Image (spheres, coloured by chain):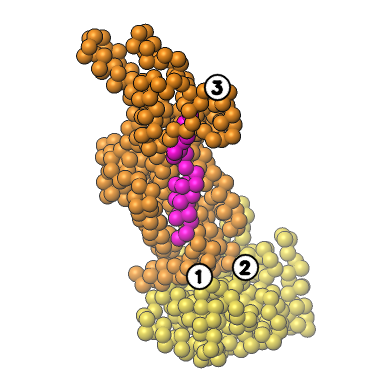
């Protein structure tokens, strides 16, 4: 046992002596969470909405009031013509405008149809989409209210769909990014750091020295993996703390289950790291393999940025072999939806299978290469 | 197998990689406390043979013992009783001197007390007491090599394998290094050394020359010089290695 401790101690010394490694290991997760959470945020705060219409119309006033009361929206100017709307959008003074037709209330009560158009700035489609959805939501809630009062009076039911985002009513983007960043960070630490540290020893020639020692290869591998396992636990905890206390992302499910899932993911990432270290003979190769071959596909294809469902089928199939995808799905289910083990059984099995396979293959390969 | 005062006994050792025979039926013995030079051109099969002797790889056929343990069955025991210093510089540059000693002491199962004593003794013997807290990467090459040799002996092995230990150092440093080797040998440690420097071959008690996976010549430097009618080992080596058919 003492042999292993000597090894692990040495590994930690390597990590903390190298400023770059320390920085990557301890600072990167925080930076990523903050970057993704704040800077690359897709949610919209205080979007200015202009209004075109007759403010003496009580129904118009009611809707405008609702817009004003919405925490994500803010009423801008009351305009008189559509050309003013365009000017304001161009200048970036407003994100969208709501235009009510004349005699809006009368028409609404007479025909049951009032025309409202929402004009938004399509130059920034993401924001436009989100703002439009906010405004639609506001109008729909007003509609529902009118409908329910009409039901009592006339008996005619005409329910309108009331769109509501479950689990994430505010479309808070950190709900999406936190699981993603967690996947990325754990993968970077476990895969890249492990493979680079092993390949570095190959390059230096110190690997030979370790191999002629009486320590069994399996223990050598294990002692290489353990420090990174410890670091990923530290990172896991720090990402979770940041997520909960800074980004306001809830942990609705069980922390134990979340940890279990993470351990499985860390296991598969370590296996991947070992595999990379077997394949590559220089640190640069290992870095490139991890950066281009693992990080990029993970970013692009695991649903962190682009939803998997909207990818072409070929890419969807490809994304299935990325361990991070399954991990992120599970984290979302556990953290945001508060799902139990039953809900993630399929993903859990897939990821566990990947872990076993990756570890088995890489340890075998590693041993035969010695 | 009788190996009373033999450190290494090798009989009919063969190592094949597919069709390629890297080591072709070699047999030799090395006595305890002997300095044995293992010569051969690049690709002659030295490294492969040495890896087998160190317990890093298994022979295709043949048998033998190193430090009294079978190269076929007792590789873990062999590893425990040999020291190894590789041609590449083999200490951790980002660890301090004492941390390197601590690490290898730990790997070879020494207790903390033993490691502390070893560290003091070793640094004193090398006159490096002041370098204790120095990073290995900041040390001059000659120091590093001496330290690497001492660390290869941290667990008092019966045999120490040196794989081109003096590559890239100046003649004075090399001479100093060989003094350490003599000292170890006089303490009863068997030294098994590969080298490309023929002046170093002269320092050995006995040398063997490998050509194309076979041992073409074996004996003391003096007897080999006589046998091949050469004035120095350089001449001997050129004559024998000149027969190589493979590069």
Residue at image position (41%, 37%) is A72
Residue at image position (52%, 89%) is B129
**Are there few (<14), some (14-19), or many (20+) residues within 10 Å of tag 1?**
few
- Which of the chains is yellow? B
- Mark 2 vs 3: CB contact within 8 A: no
Q: Chain of mark 2?
A: B
* Residue depth check, mark 1 versus mark 3: number of the one nearer the observer: 3
- Write down the colour of chain A: orange
- Mark 1 vs 3: CB contact within 8 A: no
Q: Where is residue A153 drawn, in percent x and y? A: 22, 11
Q: Is residue B92 left or right of residue A340?
A: right
Query: How many marks can you see?
Result: 3
Residue at image position (56%, 77%) is B136
Q: Secondary structure at mark 3?
A: helix
> Which comes before the other along the chain, label 1 or label 3?
1
Residue numbers of the magenta segment = A25-50
Q: Chain of mark 3?
A: A
Residue A237 sits inside the magenta stretch? no
Identify the mark at residue A17; answer none if there is no mark: 1
Closer-to-camera residue (B65/A23): A23
Q: Is residue A127 left or right of residue A247?
A: right
Q: Secondary structure at mark 1?
A: helix
Closer-to-camera residue (A19/A326): A19
Camera sees residue A15: yes
To which residue does mark 2 refer?
Answer: B46
To which residue does mark 3 refer?
Answer: A82
């Amino acid at each position: 046992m003492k042999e292993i401790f000597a090894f692990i101690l040495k590994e930690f010394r390597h990590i903390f002596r190298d400023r770059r490694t320390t920085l990557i290991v301890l600072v990167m997760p925080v930076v990523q969470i903050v970057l993704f959470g704040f800077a690359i945020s897709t949610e919209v705060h205080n979007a200015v909405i202009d209004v075109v219409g007759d403010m003496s119309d009580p129904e118009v006033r009611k809707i405008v009031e609702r817009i004003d009361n919405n925490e994500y929206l803010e009423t801008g100017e009351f305009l008189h013509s559509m050309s003013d709307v365009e000017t304001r959008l161009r200048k970036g003074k407003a994100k969208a405008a709501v235009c009510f037709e004349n005699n809006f209330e009368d028409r609404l009560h007479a025909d049951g149809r009032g025309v409202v158009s929402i004009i938004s700035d399509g130059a920034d489609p993401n924001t436009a989409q989100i703002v439009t959805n906010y405004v639609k939501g506001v109008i729909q809630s007003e509609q529902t209210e009118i409908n329910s009062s009409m039901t009592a009076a006339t008996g005619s039911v005409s329910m309108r769909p009331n769109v509501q985002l479950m689990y994430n009513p505010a479309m808070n983007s950190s709900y999406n990014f936190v699981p993603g960043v967690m996947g990325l960070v754990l993968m970077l630490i476990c895969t890249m750091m492990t493979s680079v540290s092993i390949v570095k020893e190959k390059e230096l020639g110190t690997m030979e020295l370790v191999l002629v020692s009486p320590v069994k290869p399996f223990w050598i591998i294990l002692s290489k993996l353990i420090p990174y396992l410890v670091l990923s636990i530290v990172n896991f905890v720090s990402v979770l703390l940041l997520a909960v206390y800074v980004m306001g992302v809830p942990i609705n499910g069980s922390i134990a289950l979340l940890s279990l899932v993470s351990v499985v993911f860390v296991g598969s990432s370590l296996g991947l790291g070992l595999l990379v270290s077997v394949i590559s003979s220089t640190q640069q190769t290992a870095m490139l393999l991890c950066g281009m071959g693992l990080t990029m596909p993970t970013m692009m294809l695991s649903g962190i940025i682009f939803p998997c469902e909207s990818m072409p089928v070929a890419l969807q199939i490809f994304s299935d072999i990325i361990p991070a995808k399954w991990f992120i799905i599970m984290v979302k289910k556990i953290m945001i939806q508060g799902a139990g083990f039953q809900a993630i059984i399929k993903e859990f099995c897939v990821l566990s299978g990947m872990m076993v396979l990756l570890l088995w293959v890489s340890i075998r390969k590693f041993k035969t290469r010695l | 197998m009788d190996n009373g005062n033999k450190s290494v006994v090798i009989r009919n050792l063969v190592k094949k990689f597919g069709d390629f025979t890297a080591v072709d039926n070699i047999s030799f013995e090395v006595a305890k406390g002997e300095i044995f030079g293992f010569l051969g051109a690049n690709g002659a099969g030295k490294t492969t043979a040495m890896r087998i002797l160190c317990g890093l790889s298994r022979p295709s056929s043949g048998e033998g013992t190193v430090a009294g343990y079978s190269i076929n069955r007792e590789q873990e025991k062999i590893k425990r009783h040999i020291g190894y210093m590789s041609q590449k510089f083999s200490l951790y540059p980002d660890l301090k001197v004492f941390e390197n000693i601590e690490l290898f002491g730990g790997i070879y199962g020494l207790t903390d007390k033993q490691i502390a004593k070893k560290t003091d003794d070793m640094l004193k013997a090398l006159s490096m007491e002041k370098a204790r807290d120095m990073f290995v990467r900041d040390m001059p090459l000659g120091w590093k090599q001496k330290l690497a040799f001492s660390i290869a002996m941290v667990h008092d092995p019966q045999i120490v394998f040196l794989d081109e230990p003096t590559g890239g150092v100046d003649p004075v440093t090399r001479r100093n290094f060989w003094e350490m080797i003599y000292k170890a040998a006089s303490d009863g440690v068997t030294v098994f050394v590969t080298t490309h420097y023929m002046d170093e071959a002269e320092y050995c008690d006995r040398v063997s020359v490998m050509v194309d996976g076979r041992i073409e010549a074996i004996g003391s430097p003096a007897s080999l010089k006589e046998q091949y009618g050469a004035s120095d080992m350089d001449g001997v080596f050129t004559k024998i290695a000149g027969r190589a058919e493979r590069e």
